[in-house]
Amino acid sequence: MGVKGISGMAVTGTLGDATAARDSSNLQKEAVKFSELVKEMQRNTAMGLAEKNGNTVSGVSSSQIAKNHRLNGDYTQGFYGAFTSEADKKAAPKGLAANVKGSNGKTPVIDKTSDLYAQSMELENYMVKMMLSSMRNTIQHTSLAGENNEYARKMYDDMMYDNMAEAMTKNSSFGIADQIYIELSGQRK
């Protein structure tokens, strides 16, 4: 029984070594494929930017790769592309900005499909997050789930409040983004 066990161990060890070598070889092949794919994507992006700008591009930055001003791994939806209809291109201000008049006495027009408005929404979203965070800090939490889940609870709460702030920004007419858009677009001079 002892000899069988030793030879069985040797066979198992040899098979294990062969499996590990095969897995290592497959992993290296996949790594090479992945790096080639990344290089091809960078070349395509650089060529597209060069054609768009009419010049040569020596490198590609992460801001040029990011689509719709979002970082890889963002779990929020963001505000780019949230408004797409024709009516959104000539919207009237809401909320705080509803009473604003331009230098000519007329109510300004807001293009909700523009990048400036999306950035204005991001800033309003940040302000709403700060408000919700201040409100959240007034809540006392019990330790019914135990102290082991404290980190997970905080992470979940952060994600929940981020999504809540985004929904509030999109759906309730605070008008902060409209006010910011009007000021930055120069319609209130």
Image (cartoon, rainbow, N blue to C red):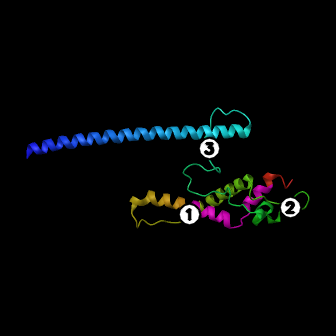
Q: Which x, y percent locates residue 71?
A: 59, 49
Residue drawn at x 74%, y 36% as measured from the top left: 54
Q: Which x, y percent locates residue 123?
A: 68, 55
Q: SS class of the residue under badge 3?
A: helix
- Gap between marks 2 and 1 measured at Cα: 36 Å
Q: Residue under circle 3?
A: 65
Q: How crowded is mark 2: few (under 14 residues within 10 Å), some or many (20 or more)?
A: some
Q: How crowded is mark 1: few (under 14 residues within 10 Å), some or many (20 or more)?
A: few
The first of marks 2 and 1 along the sequence is: 2
Mark number displayed over residue 91: none
Q: Residue under circle 1?
A: 136
Q: What residue type is labelled 3?
A: Ile
Q: SS class of the residue under badge 2?
A: loop
Give the magenta-colored segment's residue range.
Answer: 160-182
Q: Name the side, left or right, on which 91 lies relative to 133.
A: right
- Gap between marks 3 and 1 measured at Cα: 35 Å
Q: Which amino acid does label 1 sit on?
A: Arg
The first of marks 3 and 1 along the sequence is: 3
Residue drawn at x 39%, y 59% as measured from the top left: 148
Q: Which x, y percent locates residue 44?
A: 62, 40
- Gap between marks 2 and 3 measured at Cα: 39 Å
Q: Residues within 10 Å of mark 3 (few under 14, many from 20)?
A: some
Outermost residue toward the left in this view: 1
Q: Which amino acid does label 2 sit on?
A: Lys
Q: Name the side, left or right, on which 77 lies relative to 187.
A: left
Given residues 25 and 148, the one toward you in this image is: 25
Q: Residue under circle 2?
A: 101
Looking at the rendered image, the disc whose residue lies closer to the viewer, 2 or 1, is: 2
Given residues 70 and 187, the one toward you in this image is: 70
Q: SS class of the residue under badge 1?
A: helix
> For the stretch drawn in magenta, what is the main secondary structure?
helix
